[in-house]
Image (cartoon, rainbow, N blue to C red):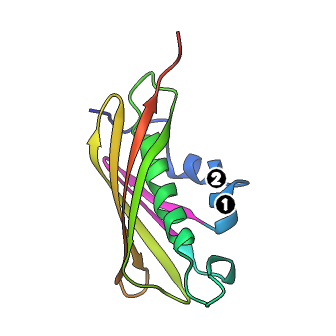
């Protein structure tokens, strides 16, 4: 079982996304614990589809980023990195303003794979807007 890596913090996770997609979208990590990571994303026009509803890709970006950062924080000792090998989402609702929140929870922390579930909610009401699951492949040094 992977343990939480002591060198990974909320600060290092938030810094990592700065000039990449998570930073551009305004994704912010909030709380890191053993087997869990919580995050949020303010809803802006750039997160919407032309119909003015929250774009599904924006929701997936929040969930996938949260699960990915959680994977980084829980990589086994000696592992180099990870890559997503499968993801699935069910969209149950939307929001047009405010923020959405995400809570990622480890379901499996193995030597070669990790499985994470995430729930995305309307931050103000707590109403569930999406359920997400991904499988991450742990990458090890070659040779």
Q: Residue at x 52, y 80 (%)?
A: 99
The vertical placement of 41 against 43, above or below, is above
Relative to 2, residue 115 above or below: below
Residue 138 lies in what quarter of the image? top left
139 on left or right of 2: right
Residue 70: x %, y % from top left:
43, 48
Q: Which residue is mark 1?
A: 23
| Res 104 visible | yes
- Residue 101 in the magenta stretch? The answer is no
Lower sequence index among marks 2 and 1: 2
Q: How far across and down, in percent of the image, does residue 118 sit?
A: 36, 62
Q: Residue at point 58% right, 65% down?
A: 27
Whether residue 39 is situated above or below residue 15 in the rendered picture: below
Q: Are marks 2 and 1 in contact (CB under 8 Å)?
A: yes
Percent position of residue 10, x then y: 51, 52
Residue 5 visible to an observer of this rendering:
no
Residue count near mark 2 (Cα–Cα under 10 Å), binned few <14, some 14–19, many ≥20? some
Q: How many numbered markers are drawn?
A: 2
The residue singled out by tag 2 in the image is 17
Distance between the alpha carbons at the discs numbered 2 and 1: 5 Å
Q: Which residues are magenta?
A: 27-40
Judged by its main secondary structure, the magenta piece is strand
Residue 141 placement, left or right of 135: right
Q: Residue at x 64, y 53 (%)?
A: 17
Q: In the displayed structure, does residue 120 sit left or right of residue 9?
A: left
Residue at image x 67%, y 83%? Answer: 45
């Amino acid at each position: 079982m992977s343990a939480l890596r002591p060198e990974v913090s909320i600060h290092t996770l938030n810094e990592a996304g700065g000039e990449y997609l998570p930073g551009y979208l305004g994704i912010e990590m909030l709380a890191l614990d053993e087997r869990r990571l919580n995050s949020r994303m303010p809803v802006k026009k750039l997160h919407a589809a032309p119909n003015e509803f929250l774009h599904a890709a924006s929701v997936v970006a929040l969930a996938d980023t949260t699960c990915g950062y959680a994977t980084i924080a829980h990589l086994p000792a000696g592992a180099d990195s990870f890559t997503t090998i499968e993801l699935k989402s069910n969209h149950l609702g939307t929001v047009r303003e405010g923020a959405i929140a995400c809570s990622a929870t480890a379901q499996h922390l193995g030597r070669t794979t990790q499985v994470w579930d995430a729930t995305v909610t309307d931050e103000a009401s707590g109403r569930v807007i999406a359920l997400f699951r991904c499988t991450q492949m742990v990458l090890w040094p070659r040779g």
